[in-house]
Image (cartoon, rainbow, N blue to C red):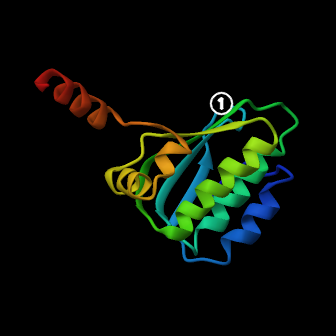
Amino acid sequence: MLVGRGSPCAERVLLAEFDHPPAFDIRLRPGTDGRVLDAVGELDQDTGPLLNAAVDCALDTPSVLRELVIDMSQVVFCGSGGLNALIRAHLKARETGTVVHLLNPTGPVTALLRRTGADRVLQVSPGPAETASAQEDSRIV
């Protein structure tokens, strides 16, 4: 786990890290000023607090964020606890005028978002494979 080592938020995230197995990692993408978080692994009730802590850190930065991107392209599983963490991130960000944007969710994550209707609440950008599939579908019709 690496969320701005040496930053005031790092301690909060490190404390959250000890409460779960190492099945999930979230990192600030270098050079994005805390605006892009790369999520990797399984997002569930045990690992959701890591996402919560990382989002809290990003929102606590002195710069004004208008958009916080969470790259979900390497999240292989998302359970109800992970969905709860994503919705919490959306609600917390909305309080500060920030939009949370889920980028490139994998198939299992996309399926969960659709089944629950969360894709109508959260801003989601499809991955390249899904975009190509949607374009093919529109040509067939």
Write the residue at 15% across / 21% down: 139
Give residue 90's position: percent from left, percent from top: 66, 48
Q: For the N terminus, which image quadrant?
A: bottom right
| Up/down of 98 relative to 89, above or below | above
Name of the residue lying farthest toward the top: 139
Question: How crowded is the residue under tag 1: few (<14 C-alpha within 10 Å), some, or many (20+)?
Answer: few
Name the kind of residue labelled 1 in the image: Gly
**Number of marks:** 1
Q: Which of 121 and 72 is in front in this view?
A: 121
Q: Residue at x 73, y 59 (%)?
A: 53
Q: Is mark 1 on a helix, strand or loop?
A: loop
Question: Which residue is nearer to you in this view: 134 or 20?
Answer: 134
Residue at x 35%, y 54% (from the top left corner): 111
- Can you give x and y, in whole percent of width and height, for residue 43 in the image? 51, 64
Q: On the rendered structure, is 68 left or right of 130?
A: right
Name the quadrant of the C terminus.
top left
Asked whether residue 62 appears in the rendered view, the answer is yes
Residue 104, percent from left and from top: 42, 40
* Residue underneath mark 1: 31
